[in-house]
Amino acid sequence: MSKIKGLKAFIGLITHGRYSQNMILSSANRTSSFSDQCLVRSVTTSERTNGKISAAVASDEKNGTGDSDQTASQKPVRGGPVSWLSLVLLIVTGGGLIVYYDKEKKRHIEGLKTASSTVKQGPSVGTAAIGGPFKLVNHYGKMVTEKDFLGKWTLIYFGFTYCPDICPDELQKLAAAVDKIKAKTGMEVAPVFISVDPERDNVEQVHEYVKEFHPDLIGLTGTTDEIRQVARAFRVYYMKTEEEGSDYLVDHSIVMYLMNPNMEFVKFFGKNYDTDALTEGVIKEIKAS
């Protein structure tokens, strides 16, 4: 009986040993299989990666360019849209500045025109202190005073006969405006030229000068003191410049003075007024009086 139990125990031991051996071998086989699969996957991935790298290198070698060349060739492509955008922004900004400058310039000119064409008077100031008594000689050699112009509207311009350009332009404008005023309203305005160059503008010189512009243009001259007095009365600036012997110019105010029939100052018109603006300005003042 004991032999039989011992035999069964021996057989169980052998069986158990075989089972354990099988378990160990099975586990080893599974581990080996898993390792082989990982190795195969690793090799496959490595081959694919190496294949892509080899293909990229082959492509670069075929095209004759490397990474640096590809990057360099892509820079203009990336920079192109930015450059065009910058150019468009520059054009738009420049155009806006030009338009803004043009508007501001026109506004500034209009402001100067308004300021120079309007005599601002306070409520207690009254008539501007421009004008006054004077005694001069006309282009016929006759002595005249401010009283000789009473009863008529008068436009007075100060200049000199040797003036190269400004005085002729202003006197032509004055003559044209006088004719237009008469044609539109039937009223006569006396045009008057007063010399600020008494040393050269004698009666004969002034006579020859005024007839070049208008048959009704009255030329006045006088001595140095007489011219200084009338210029001071009308707030006219004048000064000799670039003197070379008898050849010189006279810097002076470029203004026309509108005087009413009482020889009282009404308004002055600057160089910025053209013929039409001067005409309408004078007519407006006459109708408002």
Image (cartoon, helix red, strand yellow):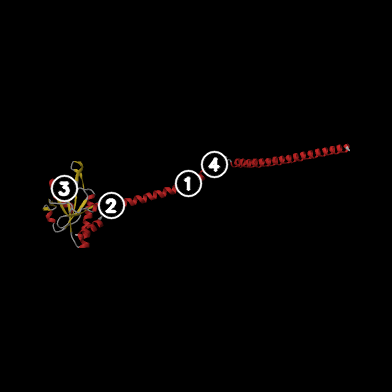
Q: Which residue is mark 3?
A: 232
Residue drawn at x 69%, y 41% is: 38
> Tag 2 or tag 3, which sits nearer the N-term?
2
Q: CA distance from mark 1 to mark 3?
A: 66 Å
First in residue order: circle 1 vs circle 2 = 1
- Look at the numbered discs 4 and 3 and tell me whether their residues touch, using CB distance below 8 Å: no
Measured as percent of width and height from the top left, residue 168 is found at: 22, 51
Specify few, some or many for label 1: CA neighbours under 10 Å numbering under 14, 14-19, or 20 or more.
few
Secondary structure beneath dot 2 equals helix
**Location of mark 4 (residue):** 71
Q: Please, what is the three-letter code of the amino acid marked with disc 1? A: Val
Q: Earlier in the sequence, mark 2 or mark 4?
A: 4
Q: Identity of the amino acid at label 2? A: Gly
Labels 3, 2: front one: 2
**Above or below, comparing residue 186 to residue 138 in the picture:** below
CA separation in Å, label 3 and label 2: 27 Å
**What type is the residue that disc 4 sits on?**
Thr
Q: Nearer the viewer, residue 22 or 206?
A: 22
On screen, residue 55 versus residue 227, left or right, reads right
* Dot 3 amino acid type: Arg
* Image position of 231 with respect to 282: above or below: above
Dot 3: what SS?
A: helix
Q: Badge 3 local density, few (<14 within 10 Å), some, or many (20+)?
A: some
Query: Looking at the picture, how far across and down is residue 84, in whole percent?
Result: 46, 48
Mark 2, other Cα within 10 Å: few <14 / some 14–19 / many ≥20: few
Image mark count: 4
Q: Which residue is tagged 1?
A: 82
Q: Which residue is mark 2?
A: 111
Give the CA separation, mark 2 to mark 4: 59 Å
**Residue 270 horizontal/vertical position (percent):** 23, 52
The residue located at (29%, 51%) in the rendering is 109
